Image: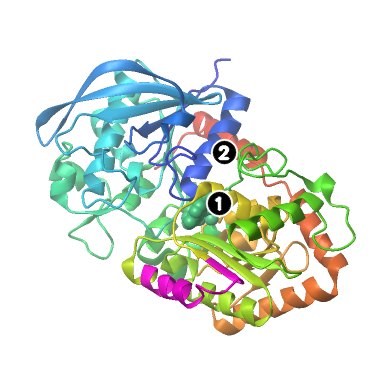
Amino acid sequence: MKKMDIIHIAAEMAPIAKVGGLGDVLLGLGRALTEKHKHVEIILPKYDCLDYDQISPLEVVMHDLSSYFENAPVHNTIWRGHIDQIQLTFIETHDPYGFFERGTVYGCPDDIERFTYFSKVALEYLVKSNKNPEIIHIHDWHTSLTPILLKEMFSALSKAKTVLTIHNLAYQGISNRESLEKIGLSKDILDRYNLHDPQQTHLYNLMRGGIENADAVTTVSPNYAKEVLTPMGGGNLYRCLNDNSHKFQGILNGIDCEYWNPKEDPFLPFHYNHHDIHASSHPFIPPKGKIQKHLRHLLSLAEEECPIVSCITRLVPQKGPELIKQGILKTLEKGGQFILLGSTSDPQTHEVFYNLKRKFAESRQVHIELTYNEPLSHLVYAASDLFLVPSIFEPCGLSQLIAMHYGTVPLVRRTGGLADTVFEGFNGFVFEEPTAEGIQSAMDRAFVMWKEDSSQWRKLIEAGMKMDVSWKKPMEEYLHLYKHLQTHKIHV
Ligand code: ADP
């Protein structure tokens, strides 16, 4: 029997164009599907800021794919490349605005135009290259107009069933009519597809359009799937999600265990895995102890017998910046060391943490790095003892999974996918309320255990490292969904 052709269309992919977990998912799921299934292709914008060194070999497969924007013709060049065996297709748009020549993935005032145009050209490319995929898998609002585009403009692709994965419901792609008309969607068409924002009804909501019109909708953990069906968790899209709950499910993310592999990670000076847990006292994994020494030296932290607590995150309200600050202060009060690697584009949040960095400029117990730094993140995951994820909400969360895989014990708030993966007393520490008291009491428990019950601490490390956090099971669940969509009649 012929294998299904599976196409992913997305805005991010690690490690070449990564902003957060969405990029990690495309790499991990893309690799797992490619290894098992083979017929997989990922379509991405050809950003000027792609990490070109990691793509090989990049070649043009279509010189002149014509499309239109604002009623004017636009040419596009289609490129093919690979990361390991994963087949990637890049769309280079020769539009007058330089959509993907901004030195950034997101954050432009015309993001709606950039990603809706990209979504349309991705489908144009599939038609022109005579591809007729069984599955088109789209991700977040950036590509969630795809099911509507398919119905209205691309009948040649009518065989394709669409899967939308919601990585974060907080970003919905709210648009005015004019922006969507630029790719050729008239008001009549737009009004046919339940695309209006439920609250600001004169505007359009691309995430809603995806949820209403895709053949299946997934989110990235079972618990987040439950949360967004409540008014509190689903917010303005709570009703829309409930109306579509028959085609909605949570599939827990994995991590790419080739990329995140402490046994071979090229960013680490020493290597290990769970077979190396054998010392009877801290740091339990001798190479991890050597990495701690290396990182303390690199960041000018004092060489002391104390735990390293860390946090690697985008500094946005979702991630609980106030709780992260509490975590830093509590760590110092308890005699630990703290490393924060946080990226933010919000000037106010930047200022709060920049002030904190200045306050501790002379301290050899704290290091605050306000940037995105992939190599440093690997060292911090490997060198830390305790890893904080005090999120207000968290669709899945990958950082706690990476931390556990690197033998670092997570301390998380019980929400979303964190509640599906971290369990107090088994592999980490969990607190309920997003308050200073909540995080402080969990940190008290962690410090007491680190100091007084090292055999229990060792068990937490071992349980975390032995957990199957790979893409094997989630990939099978996605394949099962794809096959189900092929064999069952769908009522959208
Ligand atoms: P989100 O997608 O909401 O940002 P996730 O936990 O799902 O959160 O994924 C975050 C990913 O981004 C992880 O791979 C994490 O290591 C990485 N990351 C976040 N902030 C930084 C940073 N400042 N520097 C390096 N990597 C970061």
Position of residue 340 relative to residue 179, above or below, is below
Q: Nearer the viewer, residue 296 or 266?
A: 296
**Element carrying mark 1:** helix
Residue 368 image offset from top left, x and y in percent: 51, 66
Q: Which residue is mark 2?
A: 28
Residue 291 image offset from top left, x and y in percent: 70, 52
Q: Nearer the viewer, residue 192 or 301?
A: 301
Residue 438 lies in quadrant: bottom right
Amino acid of disc 2: Gly
Q: Which residues are magenta?
A: 350-367
Residue drawn at (24%, 55%) of the image:
196
In the rendered structure, does residue 355 fall within the stretch colored magenta? yes
Reading the chain from its start, which is encountered first: label 1 or label 2?
2
- In the rendered structure, find residue 376 and report the number of the disc placed on it: 1
Residue 248 seen in the current view? no
In the rendered structure, does residue 488 fall within the stretch colored magenta? no
Q: Nearer the viewer, residue 413 or 338?
A: 338
Residue 106 image offset from top left, x and y in percent: 32, 49
Residue drawn at (55%, 26%) of the image:
84
Q: Is residue 424 left or right of residue 394?
A: right
Residue drawn at (59%, 24%) of the image:
37
Q: Is mark 1 within 8 Å of ligand 1?
A: yes
Q: Nearer the viewer, residue 246 or 149?
A: 149
Residue 149 seen in the current view? yes
